[in-house]
């Protein structure tokens, strides 16, 4: 039995039909923006391997840091013990984040980061005597991960977890902010979407622990870019109703939108921030949930006296060392110029797709480029085309998109854009 035969018979892949998985490519090596397969095929990873490999694959600085760490201490428990990699990574994160966000809880993955953030919000509210504040508000079109509580705040109808909605906690869903990023903002709450949030918090605020949203960019829920004015209004309304504000920046953090964090577009600071993906430059799974001192202190004053969560691999030194190296690259390389150049090139070269039959919209922000189709695009079509185009794309729903590594060259990016346009043309 060949490796691919065994894979097809025994291994599950994400969001893939086990009976008909479609084309599968056996990758044997990665370097920079390139994936090399067992048959010698080379493809540009236009997805940054689901948005995390911002510096490219197998970056020598990150790989070197991990090799040194594995020789010294691959892992040690974090309960009652600490270590330099966790401390140094914390220093870097605190220096990068807005003032006030300075209490860091290390997590295993992005979904766990969201779970932790939601648990923090509930424990904080209970500690303040608000025992009834155990529910959450969010906006439609969002995606926050695959674990149980995270699924409850993903879009219940159009999201990937709709079939579980009868088993999940019932949360409060608002229409997504109607004003898009490139449109003019209005302070009229009836048309900017904030009237819906104001009404919900007025009627249900005593039951809601927090509002959780992806700031500016909704990722796997639809690649929708909305106006920062909505976040500014949401911050004020949450404050008025004693509701915490949680930002899920797992997909957008560390430069992806052309700002260090997407919240920087709005100049709004949440009470709790979820980070992941690019935190280690895509070299190992890791995440963090960052809270304000007020939230951390409030939890410390609860009946439990401690936050009731503690993963076995919390603050794994190997992952921390990768994070230190990845954030060091952001500090020392011109990511702002890189993402700005990617944005300008994608805006210019993706424009040709707008006139294609079947294309509903074309939009770009930072190092994110999207061709939205009228109809669903089967990812298996893109997988089959990849060896011929030399570009690895993974569309979802109606979106053909790319989030390339920041190190991609203009010629490589043109190749990616050509493949996106060709897929859009062939999908009609």
Image (spheres, rainbow, N blue to C red):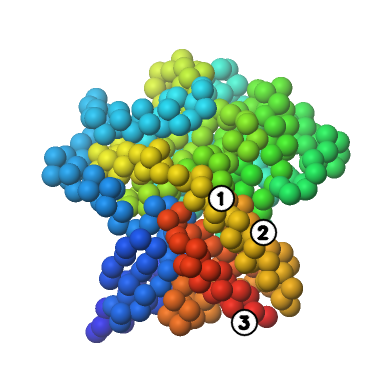
Residue 243 shown left or right of residue 308 in the figure: right
- Report if the CB atoms under discs 2 and 3 are less than 8 Å apart: no
Of the two numbered discs 2 and 1 on the same chain, state the one appearing first in sequence: 1
Horizontally, is 130 left or right of 307 in the view?
right
Q: Which residue is mark 3?
A: 426
At numbered mark 1, what does the secondary structure look like: helix, strand or loop?
helix
Identify the residue at horizontal 43%, vertical 49% (top origin). Answer: 277
Please tell me how crowded label 3 is: few (under 14), some (14-19), or many (20+) other residues with Cα within 10 Å: few
> Whole-Å distance between the Cαs marked 2 and 3?
19 Å
Compare residues 27 and 396 and report the one nearer the observer.
27
Tell me if residue 282 comes above or below residue 254 in the rendering: below
| Corner quadrant of residue 84 | top left
The quadrant holding residue 130 is top right
| Residue under the point 62% across and 82% down | 426
Residue 56 % position (x, y): 38, 57
Badge 2 or badge 3: first in the primary sequence: 2
Q: Mark 2 against mark 3, which lies toward the viewer?
A: 2
Q: Position of residue 298 (x, y in %)?
A: 50, 18
Q: CA distance from mark 2 to mark 1?
A: 15 Å
In percent of width and height, residue 344 lies at 60, 56
Of residue 254 and residue 6, the one placed in the foreground of this image is 254
- Dot placed on the residue nearer the N-terminal end, 1 or 3: 1
Find residue 200 and name its label.
none
Q: Which residue in the structure is indicated by mark 1? A: 340
The residue where tag 2 is placed is 363
Mark 2, other Cα within 10 Å: few <14 / some 14–19 / many ≥20: many
Residue at image position (64%, 44%) is: 216
Q: Is residue 283 above or below residue 410?
A: above
- Find numbered disc 2 in the image and state the secondary structure of the residue it sits on: strand
Residue 303 in view, yes or no:
no
């Amino acid at each position: 039995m060949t490796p691919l035969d065994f894979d097809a018979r025994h291994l599950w892949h994400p969001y893939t039909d086990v009976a008909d998985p479609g084309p599968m490519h056996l990758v044997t090596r990665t370097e920079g923006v390139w994936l090399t397969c067992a048959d010698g095929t080379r493809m540009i990873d236009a997805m940054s391997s689901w948005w995390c490999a911002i510096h490219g694959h197998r970056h020598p600085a990150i790989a070197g840091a991990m090799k040194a760490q594995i020789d010294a201490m691959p892992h040690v428990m974090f309960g009652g013990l600490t270590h330099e990699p966790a401390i140094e990574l914390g220093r870097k994160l605190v220096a990068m984040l807005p003032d006030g966000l300075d209490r860091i809880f290390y997590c295993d993955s992005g979904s766990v980061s969201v779970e932790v953030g939601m648990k923090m919000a509930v424990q904080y509210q209970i500690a303040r005597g608000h025992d009834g504040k155990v529910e959450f508000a969010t906006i439609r079109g969002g995606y926050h991960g695959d674990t149980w509580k995270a699924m409850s705040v993903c879009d219940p109808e159009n999201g990937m977890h709709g079939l579980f909605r009868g088993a999940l906690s019932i949360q409060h869903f608002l229409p997504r902010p109607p004003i898009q990023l490139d449109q003019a903002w209005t302070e009229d709450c009836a048309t900017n979407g904030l009237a819906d949030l104001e009404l919900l918090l007025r009627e249900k605020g005593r039951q809601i622990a927090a509002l959780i949203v992806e700031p500016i960019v909704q990722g796997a829920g639809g690649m929708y870019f909305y106006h920062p004015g909505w976040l500014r209004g949401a911050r004020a309304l949450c404050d008025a109703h004693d509701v915490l504000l949680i930002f899920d920046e797992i997909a957008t953090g560390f430069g992806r939108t052309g700002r260090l964090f997407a919240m920087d577009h709005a100049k709004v600071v949440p009470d709790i921030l979820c980070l992941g993906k690019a935190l280690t430059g895509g070299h190992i799974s890791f995440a963090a949930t960052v809270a304000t001192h007020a939230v951390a202190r409030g939890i410390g004053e609860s009946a439990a006296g401690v936050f009731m969560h503690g993963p076995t691999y919390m603050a794994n030194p190997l992952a921390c060392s990768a994070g230190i190296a990845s954030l060091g690259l952001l500090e020392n390389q011109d990511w702002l110029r890189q993402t700005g150049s990617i944005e300008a090139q994608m805006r210019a070269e993706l424009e040709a797709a707008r006139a294609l039959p079947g294309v509903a919209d074309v939009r770009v922000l930072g190092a994110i480029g999207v061709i939205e189709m009228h109809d669903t695009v089967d990812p298996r079509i893109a997988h089959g085309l990849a060896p011929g185009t030399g570009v690895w794309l993974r569309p979802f729903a109606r979106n053909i998109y790319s989030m390339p590594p920041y190190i991609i060259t203009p010629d490589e990016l043109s190749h990616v854009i050509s493949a996106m346009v060709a897929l859009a043309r062939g999908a009609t």
